[in-house]
Image (cartoon, coloured by chain):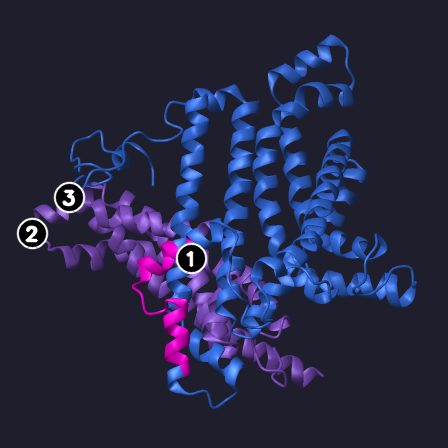
Amino acid sequence: MLKLFTRRTALAIGMILAASALTFATIAAAPGNVAALMAERVAGPSASAELVAQIEDELGLNDPLPVRYVRWLGDALTGYLGISLRFGKPIGQEFAERLPITATLLIWGGVIVFFLSLLVGFAGAISNGGWIDRLLRAFSLLAASPPNFFVAALLVILFSVTLGWLPAFGGAGVASRIMPCLTIALFPDAVLSRVVRVGLQEVMARPFATTGFAKGYGRSGVLLREALPNIAVPYLTTFGAQFILMIIGSIVVETVFALEGVGAFFIEAIRFRDFVSMQAILLTFIVFIVFVNLFVDLLCMLIDPRIRRQKNAYPEKIAVAGDHPCGPVHLDRHSRSVDQPL
Amino acid sequence: MLSRLINGARVSLFAISMVLASALLIGVVIGSLAGYVGGKVELVLISAIDIVLSLPSLIVALAFIGIFGPGYWSMIAALTMAWWANYTRMSRSVVASELHQPYIGAARIMGAGHVRIFSRHILPYVLALVVVYASADSGALVLAITTPSFLGLGVEPPTPE
């Protein structure tokens, strides 16, 4: 099992390296000279060519791409992410100010999603086709259909303008975080409550559920004891995927509610062609995504022994050059298309 | 208001069709070539596709908008770069499984060259499947277009969308 863990972790590190190399190469190929932009900021619009060349030398922009990538990655690992072209501040400091806000949104959004989806899915499964089930499903669909900025705007109209309970934008404190977290959480909640509901329905059709009824438990008892642990793996996998998608939600929501988080930083960087910040933020996103996936995979391996026992969970050998992935073409009667209908 | 809505629909629909057309072109060509050639080429391409697909498509799109600069055409280009990977993967798997079929072997025995087999037998099948998938995908694309436009990174302000 330790071997599986280490292999999965090594795969994760490989993914981070590959993805960050790809993003670095893409942004480095972007039109627009970072040195020229910096010279403009220092000396005004008529910056001289020598100043640009000097900045290029200092930043090492004339080195070949792999050297620049390794240097950038090494710097990032030791904590130096560069100086933001937009704000002039070190990016690490900018992150230190903005990460807590985004982290609050994501963590509380995740907590809301977790409890609400389990509650809604479970209630639907107990009701099993009754009016509660149908009402909850309709409501989930309704809440998840519009794009999240639209839902955010509706919430603002309802709670800030009409009722005046919650602040519309900015600010610290719990009240200013309720609406953003709710907006981020609505779509993943719809997806996950459906996963729970369908998963429970599928598990209840299995023989061990009938055994549970025979033992004397009621519907909710069987659901709780037999069915719920069985949906753990698909639920966790989907939760991981949705948690990653909540970054996108946070980007939009931070803009709507004027919160200064990492998402808003990303949008600012894009708007002002701040390539240095964009690279740093994309690296952060990549690391976050890979780590969430890694964590979910390791957790699933821990929970479900069947995943651990799969021999071909991670292939030992990849295709050798010269193999065709499908093997040679067979012309005998045992070919797939002859036996099976179209 | 109604005329703004109608004009906006025209802008949106044009953007969707441009993105889908370019993403399909790039995706189907690269994916089916990878599936047909196989071997190391396919391996490299599949790894690259998996890496590109590991990031949420909107983040890839926003990153490309950052590279090209805000604007209508850069939004279309950025969404194309975010959308092509899915079609590549799909067409590669379809081609790889179709090459297994006996009628391809029969065509090869009869002396058909690679180009003929690919264009006459494989490509129509791949296109049929991928275009159906793309038309269902266009709903997600509409929503994906609204987000950069909402953030001010898509169309310029007076233009309805």
Amino acid marked by disc 3: Gly
Q: Is residue A74 above or below residue B67?
A: above
Q: Is residue A95 above or below residue A239?
A: below
Disc 1 on helix, strand or loop? helix
Q: CA distance from mark 3 to mark 2?
A: 10 Å
Of all residues shown, which one is farthest toward the top?
A215
Q: Earlier in the sequence, mark 3 or mark 2?
A: 3
**Residue annotated with mark 3:** B105
Q: How many marks?
A: 3
Provide the chain ID for the residue under circle 2: B
Amino acid marked by disc 2: Gly
Asked if labels 1 and 3 share a chain, the reply is no
Looking at the rendered image, the quarter that the N terminus of chain B falls into is bottom right
Disc 3 on helix, strand or loop? helix
* Residue B64 drawn at (x, y percent): 46, 67
Looking at the rendered image, the quarter that the C terminus of chain B falls into is bottom right
**Residue annotated with mark 1:** A72
Residue A246 is inside the magenta segment: no
Q: Colour of chain A?
A: blue
Q: Are marks 3 and 2 in contact (CB under 8 Å)?
A: no
Q: Which mark is residue B111?
A: 2
Q: Residues within 10 Å of mark 2 (few under 14, many from 20)?
A: few
